[in-house]
Image (tube, helix red, strand yellow):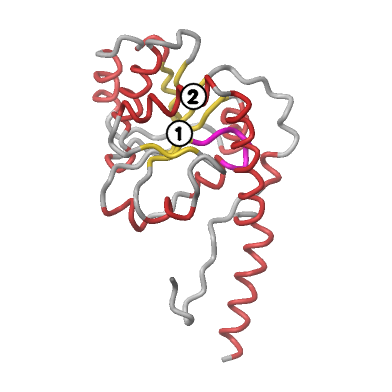
């Protein structure tokens, strides 16, 4: 628990970016948004998808974000059985990201089981949940403890490609349950990460400090 002298402000999400997107058709695509740094364990996502894709021929993987070592990423992808079903999109304009996320049927938030994951808090988690799409998250320390598996998102063992593959299988073989989890995740995000609520909280904290 936090010391009483410490005020916690959650990550902030602009929900206006995700409104009026329900008309966008899902493309049986699994999405990832973020950097391709070591902490993000892109290899786990790639190998996990390849395992899953061997039993699910209609799905694709979409990777969005900055890759500092694209040649290595391409080398790993080319070694996979289902390389032709992996799309490396790269960096997108800010306004296009909500649409590209909404086109996905599941979103993956992967972290390696390292110290960074224990203390970092990814903003994209709030954005993922804001879509109402099922979110799969590696069960590392830190922020992972704040979420119940199977309620607002789906957890899987970190650094474990089979665990990710199994989690993806659950999503696509249990669409009703997964859809409910996605909706629960959006409600949770609206309660915790809405920028207007958190912005007002931050202003109140700053005013309190100014009055001291």
69 relative position to 84: left or right: left
Which residue is label 1 attached to? 108
Residue drawn 32% across the image and 39% down it: 158
Q: Nearer the viewer, residue 133 or 153?
A: 153
Q: Position of residue 179 (x, y in %)?
A: 62, 30
* Residue contact between numbered discs 1 and 2, judged by CB atoms under 8 Å: yes
Element under label 2? strand
Q: Provide residue 152's location: percent of width, then percent of height.
A: 56, 43
163 versus 188 height, above or below: above
Task: Mark 2: give few (<14), some (14-19) or many (20+) Cα within 10 Å.
Answer: many
* Residue with the most extreme bottom position: 212
In the image, taking residue 179 as reference, residue 48 lies left or right, namely: left
* Residue span colored magenta: 129-135
The residue depicted at 55 percent of the width and 40 percent of the height is 128
Q: Which residue is mark 2?
A: 30
CA gap between label 1 and label 2 equals 7 Å
State whether residue 196 is above or below residue 97: below
Image point (39%, 9%), residue name: 84
Q: Quadrant of residue 138?
A: top left
Q: Position of residue 204 (x, y in %)?
A: 64, 76
80 within the magenta span: no
Whole-percent x and y of residue 140? Answer: 34, 47
């Amino acid at each position: 628990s936090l010391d009483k002298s410490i005020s916690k402000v959650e990550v902030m999400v602009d929900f206006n970016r995700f409104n009026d997107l329900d008309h966008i058709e899902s493309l049986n695509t699994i999405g990832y948004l973020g950097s391709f740094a070591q902490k993000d364990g892109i290899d786990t996502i790639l190998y996990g998808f390849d395992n899953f894709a061997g039993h699910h021929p209609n799905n694709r993987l979409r990777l969005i974000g900055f890759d500092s070592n694209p040649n290595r990423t391409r080398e790993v992808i080319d070694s996979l059985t289902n390389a032709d079903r992996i799309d490396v999109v790269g960096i997108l304009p800010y306004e296009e990201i909500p649409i590209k996320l909404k086109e996905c049927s599941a979103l993956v938030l992967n972290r390696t089981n390292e110290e960074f994951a224990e203390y970092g808090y990814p903003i994209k988690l709030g954005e993922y949940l804001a879509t109402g799409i099922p979110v799969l998250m590696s069960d590392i320390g830190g922020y992972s403890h704040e979420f119940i598996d199977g309620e607002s998102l789906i957890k899987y063992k970190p650094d474990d490609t089979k665990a990710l593959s199994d989690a993806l299988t659950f999503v696509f073989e249990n669409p009703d349950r997964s859809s409910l989890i996605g909706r629960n995740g959006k409600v949770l995000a609206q309660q915790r990460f809405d920028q207007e609520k958190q912005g007002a909280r931050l202003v109140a904290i700053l005013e309190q400090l100014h009055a001291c």
